Image (cartoon, rainbow, N blue to C red):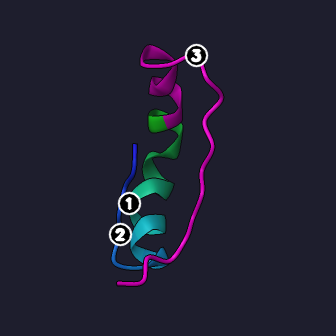
Amino acid sequence: GNLYFENLEAFQNSFGPNAEKIMGDLPNFTNIEPVIQIAEVVV
């Protein structure tokens, strides 16, 4: 899946405090090792 944030700080503020919960829930949906890729989207 793709998640879009306004900037890196918004991602860090959202994901950071919830990282353990999010990463712990991933095995309920897939058996593939997750890859986190951070990139800038230019329109």
Q: Position of residue 15 (x, y in %)?
A: 45, 55
Residue that badge 3 annotates? 31
Element type at mark 2: loop
Residue type for callout 3: Asn
Residue 33 placement, left or right of 1: right
- Looking at the image, residue 36 lies above or below residue 41: above
Residue that badge 1 annotates? 14
User: How far apart are the two marked residues, 2 and 1, measured between alpha carbons?
Assistant: 9 Å
Which residue sits at x=60%, y=57%? Answer: 37
Q: Quadrant of residue 7?
A: bottom left
Q: Residues within 10 Å of mark 3 (few under 14, many from 20)?
A: few
Residue that badge 2 annotates? 5
The one nearer the camera, 27 or 16, is: 27
Magenta span contains residue 30: yes
Comparing labels 3 and 1, the label whose residue is closer to the camera: 3
Which residue sits at x=58%, y=16%? Answer: 31
Q: Position of residue 26 (x, y in %)?
A: 48, 26
Furthest residue to the front? 43
Which residue sits at x=34%, y=84%? Answer: 43
Which residue sits at x=34%, y=78%? Answer: 6
User: How far apart are the two marked residues, 2 and 3, measured between alpha carbons?
Assistant: 26 Å
Q: Residues within 10 Å of mark 1 (few under 14, many from 20)?
A: few
> Is there CB contact under 8 Å for labels 3 and 1?
no
Q: Quadrant of residue 35?
A: top right
Residue type for callout 2: Phe
> Is there CB contact under 8 Å for labels 2 and 1?
yes
Element type at mark 1: helix
Furthest residue to the bottom? 43
| First in residue order: circle 3 vs circle 1 | 1
Magenta stretch: helix, strand or loop mostly? loop
Query: What are the residue bounds of the magenta stretch?
Result: 23-43
- Looking at the image, residue 9 lies above or below residue 11: below
